[in-house]
Image (cartoon, helix red, strand yellow):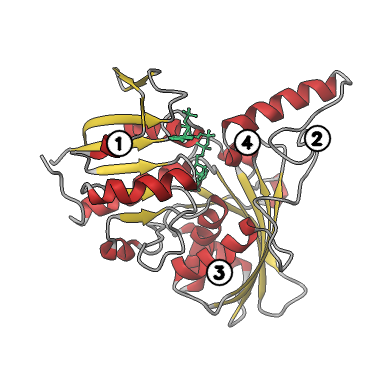
Amino acid sequence: MNAYNVAIVGATGMVGQEFIKILEQRNFPMASVRLYASDRSAGKKLYVGHEEIVVKETAIDSFQHIDIALFSAGSEISKHFAPVAAKAGALVVDNSAAWRMDPKVPLVVPEINPEDIKWHEGIIANPNCSTIQMVVALYPLHIVNPIKRVVVSTYQSVSGTGSAAMEELTTQAKLVLEGQNVVPHVYPHQIAFNLLPEIDVFMDNGYTKEEWKLVDETHKIMHADDIEVSATCVRAPVFIGHSEAINVEFANPMTPDDARRILAQAPGVKVLDDPSVSLYPFPWLAAGTDDVYVGRIRTDVSHPRGLVLWVVSDNIRKGAALNAIQIAEEAIKRNWVKPKS
Ligand SMILES: NC(=O)c1ccc[n+]([C@@H]2O[C@H](COP(=O)([O-])OP(=O)(O)OC[C@H]3O[C@@H](n4cnc5c(N)ncnc54)[C@H](OP(=O)(O)O)[C@@H]3O)[C@@H](O)[C@H]2O)c1
């Protein structure tokens, strides 16, 4: 079996740490691994398996002899270094928003469009976390009964903003419980015991960029530009796990039982849906696991061809690190990436 030289850019971050964990858990065929971050973390030591590895500052010469480069250090770093890594011959799987809508870059969820990996020119983009879990749940229904329109409201955890936001929620929760004042740093307002309907920046049309990612990325991944999507993205005081309430309008009527049957067989999906015993997914249950969970499947009483779903997933795993590693695994399986040595 071939083994690959892997680089992780952003190795010290929330997603980077999960990359390391998942590569080990899935026995990813690694010949070697190099860890990169900014100059702040250069010299820090991290374990990959039993091997202690020194984190280095990301630089132009970081990608020599690298076969697969997993990027998760934000858009600016990806814009700058992903082409450098690709030019050095690595297959880049990029977690940032930098390349997702570039027509020359495939945007991939392996359960949906693995064939798109084939036309990569060195960079493959990993979709946004809220998009990944939505399309994993919707695509199996769409191929049976085409989706016309989606209205989605998200409840997104703070881990989607990175480690500083995790600390901010912890600190603020303690301060509020002690009756003290909170000064927000990461978010524009207090996040503890609160909800903020602002993720990413506002656009001229009143939506945020996060909400617009759900529109554009859904079209690109599902190859279905005619699906109408309207999203409201909300940051919730949850550490890990994004939740989504989704109203779906189909071309033809679909019963909740049909949807449950289709989703029960769909790759990467687990149906948890028995209101009589309060069985439905929630972030605490999804955190640390790999599936996209679907529950509360019911007829939308406001539309003759509508269903309502509640979809939950670990945003750091399936929403980021796991999906990226699955892309690399798929490329290896199909011989679309080859080790240099
Ligand atoms: N679904 C998704 O695809 C998804 C989900 C979540 C996040 N993300 C993306 O992943 C990125 C990282 O998210 P996170 O949650 O892991 O954030 P995080 O916990 O804040 O970690 C950021 C990482 O980026 C590194 N970094 C920052 N500036 C750098 C620089 N100038 N050069 C090299 N490395 C630098 C940091 O290294 P230091 O330790 O040196 O600061 C750290 O390793 C986000 O910005 C986002 O673009 C994607």
Q: Mark 1 and 2 residues: CB-CB less than 8 Å, in contact?
A: no
Local crowd size for mark 4, using a 10 Å CA cut-off: few (<14), some (14–19), many (≥20):
some
Q: Residue at x 35, y 48 (%)?
A: 82
Position of the C terminus, as image quadrant, is: top left
**How far apart are the alpha carbons under marks 2 and 4?**
16 Å
First reached walking from the N terminus: tag 3 or tag 1: 1
Nearer-the-camera pick, 139 or 80 = 80
> Residue 258 got which mark?
3
Query: Whole-Å distance between the Cαs marked 1 and 4?
Result: 31 Å
The residue that disc 2 covers is 193
Q: Residue at x 78, y 44 (%)?
A: 195
Q: Amino acid at mark 4?
A: Trp
Callout 4: SS: helix
Q: Which residue is mark 4?
A: 284
Nearer the camera: disc 3 or disc 1: 1
Q: Earlier in the sequence, mark 1 or mark 4?
A: 1
Q: Is label 2 in contact with label 4 (beta carbons under 8 Å)?
A: no
Mark 1, residue position? 7
Circle nearer the viewer, 1 or 4: 1
Residue 268 drawn at (x, y percent): 44, 52
Q: Residues within 10 Å of mark 1 (few under 14, many from 20)?
A: many
First in sequence: mark 2 vs mark 3: 2
Q: Earlier in the sequence, mark 2 or mark 4?
A: 2
| Quarter of image, res 284 | top right
Up-down relation of residue 205 to residue 209 (above or below): below
Q: Quadrant of residue 258?
A: bottom right
Q: Nearer the viewer, mark 2 or mark 3?
A: 2
Q: Is mark 2 within 8 Å of ligand 1?
A: no
| Label 2 secondary element | loop
Sequence order check: which comes first, mark 1 or mark 2? 1
